[in-house]
Image: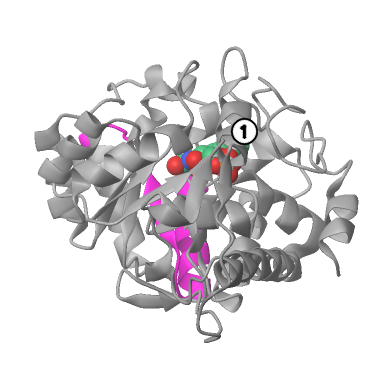
Amino acid sequence: MTYEEILANARGNMGPCKVCPVCNGLGCKNTIPGPGSKGTGTVAPRNYNAWQNIYLNLDTIAENRGVDTSLELFGRTFSMPVFAAPIGAVGNHYGSLLDEGTYTKTLAQGCVDAGIAAFTGDGLKEIFFQAGCDAMSAAGFAIPTVKPWHRDLVFKKMDYAKSMGAEVIAMDIDASGLPFLKKMDPPSGPKSVAELREFADYAGVPFILKGIMTVKGAKKALEAGASAIIVSNHGGRVLDHTPATASVLAEIVDAVEGKIPVLVDGGIRTGYDVFKALALGAAAVLIGRPFVTTVYGGGAEGVQVYVNKLKAELSDAMEMTGCASLADITRDVIRYE
Ligand SMILES: Cc1cc2nc3c(=O)[nH]c(=O)nc-3n(C[C@H](O)[C@H](O)[C@H](O)COP(=O)(O)O)c2cc1C
């Protein structure tokens, strides 16, 4: 199965997603329900475009040692620094071909088979979070991502995640911008540093905060005891007019001073984009929408095909810039034009 065949299989089967040759946010614009971004629909394209403005510094005067794309994180070894991003409620956004259970199980297993891992999502129906935890348990590893509900519901969901064997739990703190969360009673949404510290303690496993876009936010996440942060604007779905994640990544990495790993997502589509994110200081990246396409168009095998493609591209970038390991990918291997 080739990547092009996966896209062809998926086309016409993904509800409002048109399965564009390049998933750059232009085809879906502001289509929600659907995979689009909020308001003007310009944030997802901005995320994508920002990576395209970064270039690689070719330099092959180096020892010919081969390249090692492996990553150590959360006490585990991964084949490359890429995770599938949490995508919840696929049935609402991509039509009815796959239910939440089938989607998350296929994705989590496909990722583990490919040596990486999936984050799983959350949503209004209880089954959305549970399906992710069940998939994690079946696959052996995944990272459930709970939304910033009210305290008791967060605790209840964390209890379920832990009962299913979660080794790491994430929270998409930026989900406060989703309309259904705004309407919740008791109120859900923004959380103080003290409230987040309570969640981090209650998790009892590494707790990741996803949806950090400022130096100030990163410092608050550190204060709250986060074990890692994810620079993310939720693919443009929670607030219109935000900058691209690639634009804010370096300053956030600098502010964190290596105290915890900084991950990033938003418009990362190829292994070359992964390389650029690492050069700006990310420990790893998450990729969202393209993994949905690979599962719809190719199942667990589709995930393997996409991961192989990403790995070949990242390896090419490393080899051609004189980087034998991920640690060698520093800011001097990229430039802006
Ligand atoms: C349909 C859809 C559903 C999503 N659901 C979740 C979710 O449940 N939890 C979460 O943290 N992020 C969710 N996200 C955001 C993604 O995890 C990710 O941050 C975003 O899509 C940016 O990455 P991408 O440009 O590679 O898609 C969702 C995104 C989409 C498009």
In magenta stretch: residue 133: yes
Image coordinates of residue 223 in percent, x first then y, are 10, 42
- Disc 1 marks a residue whose amino acid type is Asn
Side of 155 where 79 appears, left or right: right
Coloration mode:
one colour
Count neighbours of disc 1 (C-alpha within 10 A) and say few if under 14, some if 14 to 19, many if 20 or more. Answer: some
Q: Position of residue 122 (x, y in %)?
A: 46, 43
Which residue sits at x=54%, y=74%? 61
Q: Looking at the image, which residue is at 82% across and 35% down? A: 18
Q: Please tell me which residue is depicted at 55% across the width and 65% down the height of the picture.
A: 321
Q: Position of residue 328 (x, y in %)?
A: 40, 68
Hey, which quadrant is residue 233 in on the image? Answer: top left
Compared with residue 1, is residue 170 higher up or lower down, i.e. above or below? above
Disc 1 is placed on an element classified as helix
Start and end of the magenta stretch?
128-151
Q: Specify the farthest residue to the top.
A: 40
Q: Residue at x 89, y 54 (%)?
A: 9
* Residue 316 position in % (x across, y down): 64, 69
Q: Which residue is mark 1?
A: 49
Q: Is residue 101 visible?
A: no
Q: Residue furthest bottom?
A: 65
